Amino acid sequence: MTPRLLLLATKDLMSYRRRPPGIATGAELLAAVPALAADVTVEDVMAEPAFDLTPGTMADLARRARAALAGFDGVVVTHGLDTIEDTACLADLVAGPGPIVFTGGVRALDDVSSDGPGNLADALTVAADPAFAGAGALVCLGGEVHAGRWVTLLDADSPAGLSSAPHPMLGRVRGSRVEVLAAPPPRPPDPRGEPESEVALIRAYPGIEGNLLIAATDAGARGVVLEGTGAYNVPASLLAAISDLTDWDIPVVVASRARAGRAGLDERPLGTGLAGAVGAIGSRGLPAGKARAALMVALAAGGGVAAAREYFARL
């Protein structure tokens, strides 16, 4: 049976034309792709440029993909690379087993050696492959298949600038077939509603003061993700503010700018992870941007610290 796929085209860099200036529709993008053994329906989606993407647009893309999976075998989303990992992670957490395959490009459609059509062809191939039927949200670029929850953009100028390290790449596209290399991450807890968009992300730095956290919540943040250092460490100047926010039922999740493992803050060696003693929640190995997506989902039903703590414990 021929797979039925939905292509959601957001018109970012891979759709740009320089001569004359313009933006290709999803149908025009699809026309640049070699014939595939799939029935593809195209839907053009209004969205901001990836560098200016809003949480509402991210959630809307995930919602559209989730709804489409009731009638399609897979969904492909064209997306700018600036925030492709953020949207793919959110989609993975809220949109069910998938597959939902995100792709993009670093060159315009009419550039010499444009990478967009090839990446789109690969993404459609992955979405049609039954091996990825329960893999959740994926990102396909440069022939590589990455889990949306693991992938990171390391090189904004490279046609193959993604990495899932320390996790494995899930597969590699070779022409019209996909070589499966590793299993996807376990499925996350079921979402309980629409993601909370008001979640702040703050990077800790030497000399940072706790009033920055308070200011974020005064501006409307219902949760805060702190990007700390090392083994989920943050400066002592933030501990009082973390305690205050926890008392106000505003969760603070601590991630790390380094690889720090999945152990909870209370499982850390003596002298590290001190934020846990005043109520912070560890990100369970998620980097800060992905921890923000997870906290958005954790707070979907209007919960607070307890809901966030339970959600991250189950990731």
Image (cartoon, grey):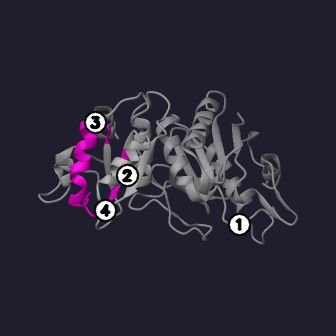
Side of 183 relative to 127 (left or right): left
Q: Which residues are magenta?
A: 224-251
Query: What residue did someone put label 2 on?
Result: 286
The Cα atoms of the two marked residues, 4 and 1, are separated by 38 Å
Q: Amino acid at mark 1?
A: Arg
Kindly identify the residue that appears in the image at 75 percent across and 64 percent down.
108
Residue 246 found in image quarter: top left
Quarter of the picture holding the C terminus: top left
Residue 72, compared with residue 8, is above or below; it is above
- Horizontal and vertical percent for residue 303? 36, 30
Residue positioned 60% across, 37% down in the render: 60
Earlier in the chain: of badge 1 and badge 3, it is: 1
Residue marked by disc 4: 208
* Residue farthest toward the left in the current orientation of the protein: 270
| Image mark for residue 248 | 3
The amino acid type of the residue labelled 2 equals Leu
